[in-house]
Image (cartoon, rainbow, N blue to C red):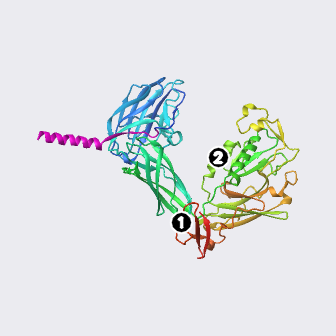
Amino acid sequence: MVRFLLNIAVALLLTMSVQASDIVYNLGAGTTYYGTGQSRNETYDVALRISDPALVGCQVTGVRIYLSSLDGISATKAWLSKDIAVKSMKFTGADVETVDFEAVKGNNEVAFTPYTITDEGLYVGYTLTAAKDVATQPIRLCRSYSADGFFIHTSGLYRSGWRSIGLDEGSLSIEVLLSGDFSDNAATAIDVPEVNAKTNSQNQIDFLVKNQGTKGLQSIDYTIEVGGATADYHADLNPAVAGYYGRTYALTANLPMVTTKGGYPINVEVTRVNGQPNASTTPVGSGFAKFYNLLPVKRPVCEEFTGLWCGWCPRGFVGMERMAEKYGDDFVGICYHNADAMEIMSSANFPASIPGFPAADLDRAVVIDPSLHDIELGWSWYREQFAPLAVDVATELDGDNLSVTAYVVSPLDMDDDRYQLSFVLKQDGMQNSTWQQANYYGGRDDLRDGVMDWFCDQGSYVSGLVYNDVIVAWSGRGGIEGSLPEHYDGDVAYEYTYTFDLNDVVNTSGKNLVQDRSKLTGIALVIDKTTGEIVNAHQALVGTTTVTAIDRPATSPDEAVSETRFFDLQGRRVLCPVPGSMLIRSETLRNGQVRTRKVIY
């Protein structure tokens, strides 16, 4: 009988050892580490927050805090708290447990009385005091950006209250020791985005897969569902993700193809981990997709303000040239000259208020330095923003009249009277043997940066330059009243034409600026009249159009496409076309007509 009871006890212990396991919670293990802090006498209170629903019921048993140096460090404490608050500019203290510890260089492991995580979540943190000019960066962070990753309060800079700065600065690099019922193979999808997408097209999303299991992640299988369509994927992760709870791996995948415009949830479900069924209790991450038949391409406008007399303006000359070379017609650049032969207006009439020369603006929303670095950085950000209207342009030269026609399309039915059109005429290849560009970079080896080197090799004035993107005429600073409607039918083009008389294209001295008609480009700008900002734009060289015969926009509601289907060459419907395949594209218009054409998807 005793032997029987002993066998039962051993079996129970073995069962408990299988069910209960330990894991380390760490948001950024394996990433780049770096320090942060102030060069002053400062007390730091820092924490991360555990808010993952899958961890409710697990126990926090300790924490590991890494200190790169002990110089100037004192009064070290580790703590757990359900809430963090400040009173009279001081942290009110942890409401679960605080443990004083004697710090050592490297990892400091501090044990807590086991605490069970509730659905309120839990802050895990530490406090230390750093001496001025000795311990200048005592807080260790990692390049894992999370809203729950880094909370800070200090006796100096952040004394008024706790701040959540994990999305900007990175996450607190501590290891939280957890005990619970953790599986070997478990993961979930997080940070599934909200995206704008195009129907009948391949659309990609980026998201993270987060480890929740003790064996980490070597491979995963997952399913993406959106708008009733699904797609299954397998990914071998390289490098593999070690078995720390919270470590992540970035993935990019195609959404299943959706044929009908509208808004749909995106669900990403991790189905298998390391070849085994996913044991996560929260395997699905969700986002949202808005599908449009026409997804407007955002083309930010960069307006540069320059002059031949301006010695630092070669910086903008190079920036604009390099951007045009790299991005082609998607880069809509316009150069406004001041106090030289290419000037068409005084600086008081510029579309942006600038502090001096050189300068530039992006979409008339922000003024920047016109260096290549600053232009590309800002322009790339604006390029990712959603444009409410799509723009195409056609230009035609008839005698001395150059007409610029804009075709503007809303992807949705919309009532909005904010938008107006404005037009610009610019010219490439402008040059004159008498023009000399002032050059403060001449002979300055200390200004060589791989971008401005050519100008560093020149003298104080540079002759023979060819000036591109020079504005030679415009319809005016603001938009044209009545150029766009107050109501838009979705997927229908609204057309407006503005005509430039080339005889009137003159500089402020009255001299005609047209040097070569073949190098003129018409630009259509969509202006938000309430802000004066540019919401989208496009450009076309004289005698050309950005509208193709195949994809010309509908010019009436009845011509708009209501449904698109794809068929193989044998007439069988294809729900998920493979890129590069030859298909029959069938478009049903709102008026009931059907048009088909053979395409390579």
- x, y (%) of residue 525? 70, 57
Q: Which residue is mark 2?
A: 378
- x, y (%) of residue 159? 49, 34
Is residue 487 magenta-colored? no
Which element type, helix, strand or loop, lies under badge 1? Answer: loop
Q: Which residue is mark 1?
A: 259
Q: Residue furthest front?
A: 570
- x, y (%) of residue 1? 11, 41
Q: Is residue 87 visible?
A: no
Q: Residue at x 78, y 47 (%)?
A: 347
Q: Residue at x 59, y 73 (%)?
A: 590
Specify start and end residues of the magenta stretch as a single range: 1-28
Which element type, helix, strand or loop, lies under badge 2? Answer: helix
Q: Residues within 10 Å of mark 1 (few under 14, many from 20)?
A: many
Q: Is residue 150 visible?
A: yes
Quadrant where the C terminus sits is: bottom right
Magenta stretch, main secondary structure, is helix
Quote the CA–CA distance across marks 1 and 2. Answer: 34 Å
